[in-house]
Image: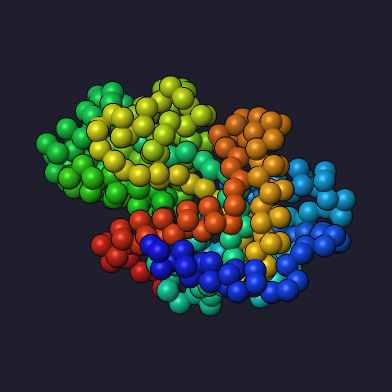
Amino acid sequence: MLAIVTAIAASSSVVAQTPDGSIGAFPERPVRIVVPYGAGGAADILARTLAAKLGQEWPKGVIVENKPGGVGVIGISSVVNAPPDGYTLVSVPVSDLAVNPHLYRKRPFDVLKDLAPVSQVGAVPNVLVVSRGLGISSARDLVALARAKPGGLSYSSPGIGSQAHLAAEIFAERIGAKLLHVPYNGVSAALSDVAAGQIDLMFAQLPTALPFIKDGRVRALGVASEKRSELIPDMPTLAEETGLSFGDMVSWSGLMAPAGTPLALREAIAKKVTAAMRSPDVQEKLRAQGTVGLGGTPDELAAAIARDHERYGKVIRALNIQLD
């Protein structure tokens, strides 16, 4: 993992030593945040929330531009090829930084080398939900049932290589049981079939799962993170329930800049991002949507990328998945 962190930070260490390390009167014109997917997703919501808050402090404003296509390729490429001056950034989910590089090896860029970290933006908890037809009420019960019926329990996901798919495989490996993967074309159908009893379990993002949990269509067994989520503090972690370690399987988004963007500039932007995302009004707005504002330094984002790149890469290699 150290090699990955070094690769992410390589251009930063060089640029940070250049004579002109100041950021001057930045920004002197509008800052553009590219979202490489359509409107309405987590990365888009976080980018627009951030842009609105930063716009209160940066008079020139912040523009959010959706550039979907090619599983993120079109939007990310536009930022990779932009001048490294801080005026073009990209808001990307963890999948683009730590998962897709393993799944799509023919991409026209290397996110570890062609983008430079700025700050984490926000995160969405993932929860393990099960069909009520299973008749269990805890993750401990699920582990016992899965071990008693090797390959007899099914889990859904919105597709092969999705974070939900990889989280379930990590869970299966940790508990020492085989689970049957049933991939769907999208989250809604995957979760609906758990509610209908056609599928036994699923790892789902909290905003998507919450309506199903509240009306009793599925049962939530635990949150897939190392600590309890502040959004659902009464829900235990899977580690608490089972005594096993699963790591942080959280869906987070990060803000990246073109490689070569000076470290001093990225650190200055990161401070503004952190202040914005941790402000009480933004936190309140995001909590209502099942999301937490994060922020943080370029180094902290680099470490998060390296951690998840290694974790998910190990699973993808074990499953021998390649999508191009």
Report the residue at 31% width, 26% height from top: 132
Report the residue at 48% width, 27% height from top: 232
Quarter of the rendering containing residue 293: top right
Indicate the position of residue 236 as horizontal and vertical percent values.
37, 27
Indicate the position of residue 255 as horizontal and vertical percent values.
62, 56
Report the residue at 41% width, 51% height from top: 163
Q: Quadrant of the C terminus?
A: bottom left
Q: Is residue 319 left or right of residue 14?
A: left
Q: In front here: 3 or 59? A: 3
Indicate the position of residue 191 as horizontal and vertical percent values.
41, 39
Indicate the position of residue 285 as horizontal and vertical percent values.
67, 33
Q: In front here: 307 or 91? A: 307
Q: Quadrant of the N terminus?
A: bottom left
Relative to 136, say whether 253 is above or below.
below
Q: Residue 48: tell me if it is visible.
A: no
Quarter of the rendering containing residue 263: bottom right
Report the residue at 17% width, 45% height from top: 176
